[in-house]
Image (cartoon, rainbow, N blue to C red):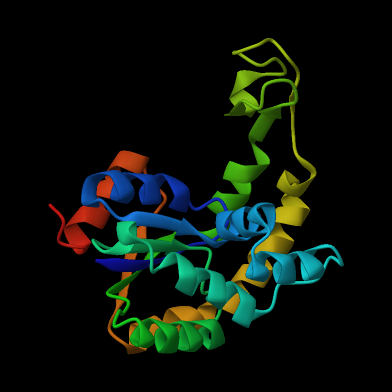
Amino acid sequence: MNIVLLGAPGAGKGTQAQQLKNDAHLAHISTGDLLREAVAAGTELGKEAKSYMDKGQLVPDEVVIGLVKERLQNPDTESGFILDGFPRNSAQAIALDAELADLDKHIDSALLVDVAPNVIIERLSSRRVCSACGYTGSAKDGATCPVCSGPLMQRDDDEPETIKARLDVYAAQTAPLIEYYRGQDKLVSVDGDRTPEEVYGDVKMKLHLS
């Protein structure tokens, strides 16, 4: 099973991806990780990506697609994969489909973890990170890390106004992408405003994994 994972920042995609990876034996492919690994390894595509990243520019679609295509040829993708973080818009989805066709592969489902913007703003704005050990918790933890007693801080990008701006960008880019996969009858939507266990139960049912 080959899955594209969709959902706004803070929707809980990572938790669901990890469960799917473990239970369905799917390769979890994060484009952010791919870029970092390619840059660190100094591959040709990594060098090209770094030239844009060093200037603070977005890495062009063709470079990202090249990295994804390389990764999809690894043996661990033979039983299926989860694409996380790509495609981000319908133009990228069309290009991805063309590259997958060259590999005799295709997307089976686009899994959307759907959470209302106000819920995401509340979730992320309450997130706290320990500056000493990296523990991630919430405002309920208070000001002190329960692991190492270091200070718990709110990240700048977890401020409500910053989150709202990120969600606005996500909505503008992703609405056409959701319609693209809906038009292919591949969109699978689950309500992400529940416990991770409840969400995953729905994921398994709708992907016919249970």
- Residue 12 visible here: no
- Locate residue 205: give its quadrant: bottom left
Q: Is residue 160 above or below residue 32?
A: above
Q: Residue furthest right?
A: 55
The total of numbered circles placed on residues is 0
Q: Quick one: 148 or 44, which is closer to the camera? A: 44
What residue is drawn where x is 30% and y is 50%? 20
Point out residue 143 in the picture as x, y percentages from the top left corner: 72, 18
Point out residue 25 in the picture as x, y percentages from the top left corner: 25, 51
What residue is drawn where x is 68% and y is 30%? 129
Quarter the N terminus occupies: bottom left
What residue is drawn where x is 73% and y is 63%? 165
What residue is drawn where x is 61% and y is 20%? 141
Point out residue 82 in the picture as x, y percentages from the top left corner: 37, 61
Point out residue 22 in the picture as x, y percentages from the top left corner: 28, 44
Q: Image check: 148 left or right of 71? A: right
Q: Residue furthest top?
A: 149
